[in-house]
Amino acid sequence: MEESKINPAEEPRKLNFLEEIIESDLASGKVESVMTRFPPEPNGYLHLGHAKSICLNFGLAMKYGGKTNLRYDDTNPTKEDTEYVDSIKEDIKWLGFRWEKELYASDYFDQLYEWAEELIRRGLAYVDDQTQDEIREGRGTVDKPGKESPWRNRSVEENLRLFREMRDGKYADGEKVLRARIDMAHPNMLFRDPLLYRIKHTSHHRTGDKWCIYPMYDFTHGQSDSIEHITHSICTLEFDVHRPLYDWFIEKLGIWPSHQYEFARLNLTYTLMSKRKLLELVQKGLVSGWDDPRMPTLCGVRRRGYTPESLKMFCDRIGVSKRDQMMDIQLLEWCVRQDLNARSNRYMAVQDPIKVTITNWEEGKVEWFDCPLNPADPEGAKRAVPFSGELLIDRADFMEDAPRKFFRLKPDGEVRLKYTYIIKCNEVIKDSEGRVVELKCTYDPSTHPVTGEWRSVKGTIHWVSVPHAREIEIRNYDRLFTLANMGEVPEGHDYKEYLNPESLVVTRGYAEPALLDDASGIAVQFERTGYYFKDKDSTPERAVFNRTATLKDSYKPE
Ligand code: ATP
Ligand code: MG
């Protein structure tokens, strides 16, 4: 992975618990090589939490010379769609990973069906006619054993007949289910005769109308892993109670022994990572789509200007733990700044302009300055920046009644215009409402950065030449939510109340002309302001730039 390039000084870190397990399995000969899988359900777009799972599954296999399958966990046809299937592949490729095989749990429907009949034949599964509610009630509670279904002791023949009839479409949704016959008093609730199949007369995005019964997660995941000889099936912590059942099916069916390991899911401050809620934001129009640059989806952060390298750096830094973690989004922002600071091209752009007129500049004269695209590489590629007698500076860089420590422009004060001359402000011009509209300044020709004498002033500000300025649209994005822990929305409140009303502020900006020729393909830095990524809404007439991150954190750590 790319991290080492970005942070060459970093010490090698110690093994995480999954690496320890893998190294010990390889050393003991328990496994010959590592095979992992990434198993998304195609019912939404991938988010940052999935990026962590992807980095882990693909990263571990790569590290140990193994392989990773992409397996769609597509057993719930009502919510799944090929739109999601395609976006998931695009996102994984964008992150820079390549899967060994593209597979679908639905590829295994025939095999799973056979295994279900096998369990029936061995008295380990039965068809239950109870309603959903009866089944739920019959399950008991943690302290109270469940009640056996009146249909639990049907003969093998009857169960086989009914199950086949279920498959053949004889019954309506919910009329019957297939359950494992385990133990209605088992301390692990999941063992109280778990559901294996339910009836759903719904077309499937791959199998069409071939099936009207669909297997449940627990009857699918372990067997799919086993079919693919997945050695380390990594999933999030909430599945730890499912592990005994995962093992039970593999043992009873006598199939290849895959093993499941759990890690803590990623939670991020000011962010939500539930596909269901993200879908609601999209459907209610509270964001512009799955790829709204404020969304924690991979297509969202990509559009915002996050790089795969920054996400991998983040995933590497947060590590893997067995306890739930709430990560600070500032770490993610730090990672993207690290990466872009090293690689992004610099340009000047002004967002809230004040005009500066250089009164001693020869009328119509233009001087071009060669400026480095990246200061980390002063000998590298350059861009040409035009200087003239009519300039724009940012309003924030001028102050009329400035305190002593204000080192930018003030009346009778001096400042260096980045890459060029020192100027002095001689006159402040205001409109009828008292708003500053123009500054009359003089430049000091002896301060030319190459041919002039060195003279230091305390402040340097960015600027743009008016006759050369390109008008652009700037979308300043901020965090989507105002509440740090979106997992703890107070009782009686809805998460949507915490949408940040200032998460998008659109302004007009003026940029130096070279910006529009930038071909780097990654976000650029607007000097002294932030990182900005060209948006797909750009037209030849008007480029649109999304703020990826500010240069400095605008938030104080809690
Ligand atoms: P959601 O709750 O957002 O719908 P999910 O777990 O249902 O997520 P899947 O498509 O089933 O989504 O997830 C694919 C893989 O990604 C699973 O192995 C899952 O454990 C993992 N994953 C999902 N969310 C996170 C997260 N926040 N952190 C780490 N891994 C995650
Ligand atoms: Mg899921």
Image (cartoon, rainbow, N blue to C red):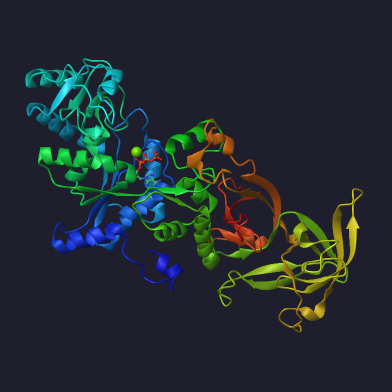
Q: Quadrant of residue 381?
A: bottom right
Q: Quadrant of residue 66?
A: bottom left
Q: Which residue is depicted at the point 47% across and 35% down?
A: 277
The vertical placement of 165 against 249, above or below, is above
In the picture as drawn, the residue positioned furthest to the front comes out as 143
Q: Is residue 210 visible?
A: no
191 or 161: which is nearer to us? 191
Q: Quadrant of ligand 2?
A: top left
Question: Residue 29: x and y, percent?
Answer: 13, 60
Picture quarter with the C terminus: bottom right
Q: Quadrant of residue 504?
A: top right
Picture quarter with the N terminus: bottom left
Q: Is residue 226 visible?
A: yes
Question: Residue 109: x and y, percent?
Answer: 20, 33
| Number of numbered discs | 0
320 or 479: which is nearer to us? 320
370 or 213: which is nearer to us? 213
The vertical placement of 171 against 345, above or below, is above
Q: Does 379 sit left or right of 189 as displayed?
A: right
Question: Residue 249: x and y, percent?
Answer: 16, 38
263 or 460: which is nearer to us? 263
Q: Which residue is depicted at the point 58% across and 45% down?
A: 537
The vertical placement of 49 against 44, above or below, is below
Question: Residue 225: x and y, percent?
Answer: 21, 44
Q: Does 203 sit left or right of 463 as displayed?
A: left
